[in-house]
Amino acid sequence: MKKSKVAISLDKSLLDLVDSKVDGSVIRSRSQAMEFFLRKGLQDQSINTAVLLIKGEHQKNLLKKLKGKTLIKGQLEFFIKYGINNLYIVTQHTKNINLLLNEISESKINVEIVETDARGNAEALKSVKDKINNSFIVMSGDTYNNFDLMKMIKKHLELDKMATMGLMTREKIHGYGTAILDGDFIVDFQEKPKQSSTNIVNAGIYIFKPEVFELFENVSSLEKDLFPKLARLKQLVGFFTYGEYEHLG
């Protein structure tokens, strides 16, 4: 690959630190050291993996048309736009699997269907645990979101908590999980309450650190089990998406 030459100014102590990483074998020069650690730092500040969670009985929603294309193709375009290059679709085996495979066959990113018999969505998410190394996005499979995902990623990385939840406001909260905020933090989360003192609701999209799996003991549902636990621990950040949202359930 052709490389471009650039001139930069560095503090001497920082330059000495860079030079100390040159070991003559793995890293053989100052330029290689700077390239290696710059690339590593940028990778640590980016997210390239997403997970769609969809029940087998709801797979037909991924094939419904929205804005002239199937929901799954709209979701793929959204993820591609924001630098996602690995997508796992976690679901069960159904008669619609071949139709779904056909829809994703020409995707510009790597898409893998992971079949599981897990009952709850948290248990389903655990099926990709060994495939996850860095922070990752999770979205409800029958949900369409279109907003500035990069801002959500930036907030997640800056606050460095276990999870960040996309939020919206709705006049009627029926059918939604609700969140109570204290600054940036969700301090209470209830899944589909009959009544609530807040109109802030779950948008069905989240960012997790991989360490979140350490909290999955006795957790079956993200909404009923995990999010209340994260809220109590002050490890759940809220982010208002201020974008398009459709639920095709």
Image (cartoon, grey):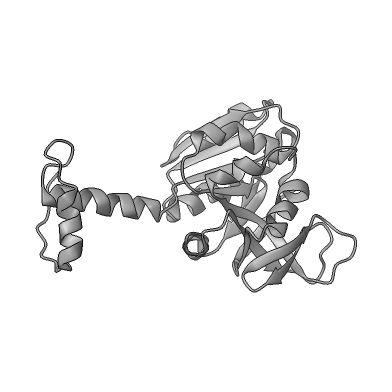
Quadrant where the N terminus sits is: top left
At x 66% / y 27%, what residue is drawn? 116
Could you say which is closer to the camera, residue 165 or residue 183?
A: 183
In percent of width and height, residue 34 lies at 19, 53
The reply, left or right, for residue 106 in relation to residue 234 is: left
Q: Is residue 48 in sight in this rendering?
A: yes
At x 74% / y 50%, what residue is drawn? 223
The reply, left or right, for residue 174 in relation to residue 7 is: right
Give residue 190's quadrant in the image: bottom right
Residue 132 in the image: above or below residue 18: above
Could you say which is closer to the camera, residue 85 or residue 60?
A: 85
In percent of width and height, residue 187 lies at 72, 64
Could you say which is closer to the camera, residue 47 or residue 98?
A: 47
At x 84% / y 61%, what residue is drawn? 174
Q: Is residue 100 in sight in this rendering?
A: no
The reply, left or right, for residue 137 in relation to residue 168 is: left
Residue 17 in the image: above or below residue 133: below
In percent of width and height, residue 94 lies at 69, 26
